[in-house]
Image (cartoon, helix red, strand yellow):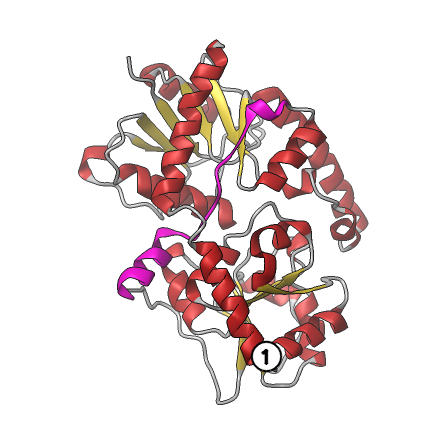
Amino acid sequence: MEKSVIINASNLNVGGGAQYAASIINEIVNSSSSSVSAIIVSSAVNQQVKIPKNWEGRVIEVPISPNRVMAFQSRKKIQEIIDAYSPDVFVTIFGPTYWRPKNVIHLVGFAQGWLIYDNSAALKLMPFWMALKRRLLNILQKKSFVRNSDYFFTETIDSANRLSEKFKVSPCKISVVENTASEYFRIKEMDDSKVIAKNIPREVGDVILLTVAVPYPHKNLSIINDLVRLLPCNYKFVVTVSSADYDRIFNRNDGRIINIGPVKNSECPSIYDQCDGVFLPSLIECFSCNYPEAFASKKIILTSKLGFATGVCKEAAFYFNPLDARDVASTIERAFLDSALMKEKIDIGFDILHQLPTPTERMEKLIAVALRCTISSVA
C-alpha cells in the first residue's frame, strides 16, 4: 500500500518561511505525485498558492496559527484532518510546533538559526526586555523541537551538523533538503516573463541596493542608517517593510532609503532586475533565499562574513563585518569600483545556482525524505 503524507504550513505567516511553503505547495499541486493526500495552510500561505480544480477541498486553511497559546480549535481541526486522511507522515514545513500531532510520524523543517548559531551580537542590539524574551523563547523552542518532532530536515549541511550537535539528535534523524530560488526566478530564466508590480525610482548614476527581509532584529537593517551617512549620495537602499516598521527603524534619509512595502514571491524577479546589488547584513540565518535569487538575477551580493553566508555563496559574494558600518561601507564602495571582479563573482553565483535543485526537485526530495521516515521508523 502506498504511503501518504500531509503537508502542514498552518504555522507560517510571514517572511521567507511562508514564501518557501507557498513555493513547495505550488509544486506539489502541479505535480503528478499521489503521495500527498492533503495540505494545511495559513491564510498568508493560502494567498500565495494557486489551487487547481483537482486539489479543491484538499488544501485546507487554518486561519489561526496552531502555535498560538489559546489556539485549541486550530489544533483540534488539524488533528481531525489527520484522523480523516490517516497519513503515514505529517510534514511541518518549518517548526517548531508547540503541540504534537497524534498517531503519525512528525517530520519537521528546522530553520531557527537563533538556536544553533552564536546569537550574542544579535541579542546586544535588543533592549533588555526584548533580549530576555528572546532567550526564554530560545529555551521554549528548543524543548518544543525535541519533544514534538520525530525527524528533521534542514536547508544546509552546516545547519544539519549544528542541529545534531546542539540538540544531541542522531544524524540519521536529520536530512538535508537544499533550498533554491523560487519558481518565479526559473520562469524568468526560461522566458524572461515577470510580474511588474512595483517600480523603484532611479536617477542617473544611482547605485541601488536591495534588501528583501522582514525587519527582525537579527536582520540588522538599522545599520543602513549609518551607511547613508558614510556612502556617497548616489548609493540608495531599497527595503520591503511595513510603513510602521519603516518609521520605527529608519531615520530621515533624504530619500536614500526607499521602502516599497512587503512583496510577494511573484514580484521579486522584477524588483531584483531594478536594483544593482543585494545587501544582506544579517547576524543570524540558517539559509536565505535572497542568495539564490541574486544568483538567478545575476546581481552582486554584499553580505555578512558569517558561516551561513559563506557556506552558500562561497566566492560569489563580497563579505563584510556586519557590526562595523565603516567596513560595510568600504566593502560596498570597493565592490562597485571593480566591475571585473563583480562580473567574476556574479558568474560564480550563476554556476552555484545550477548546482542547487530546481523548485520541482526540491519538492520531490522533501516528499522522498518524508516517505523514507516510514522505513526508518519501522527499522
- Identify residue for label 1: 336
Residue in the foreground of this view, choosing between 65 and 164 = 164
Residue under the point 34% across and 56% down: 186
Where 28 sits versus 353, above or below?
above
Extreme left residue here?
A: 53
In-image side of 284 versus 237 (left or right): right
Residue type beneath disc 1: Phe
Residue under the point 27% across and 31% down: 33
As for residue 328 lying within the magenta part, the answer is no
**Residue 321 seen in render:** yes
In-image side of 112 versus 258 (left or right): right
Place of residue 319 in the rendered image (x, y in percent of width and height, measured from the top left): 66, 64
Where 77 sits versus 166, above or below?
above
Residue in the foreground of this view, choosing between 55 and 250 = 55
Label 1: which secondary element: helix
Residue under the point 58% across and 29% down: 69
Place of residue 133 in the rendered image (x, y in percent of width and height, measured from the top left): 73, 40
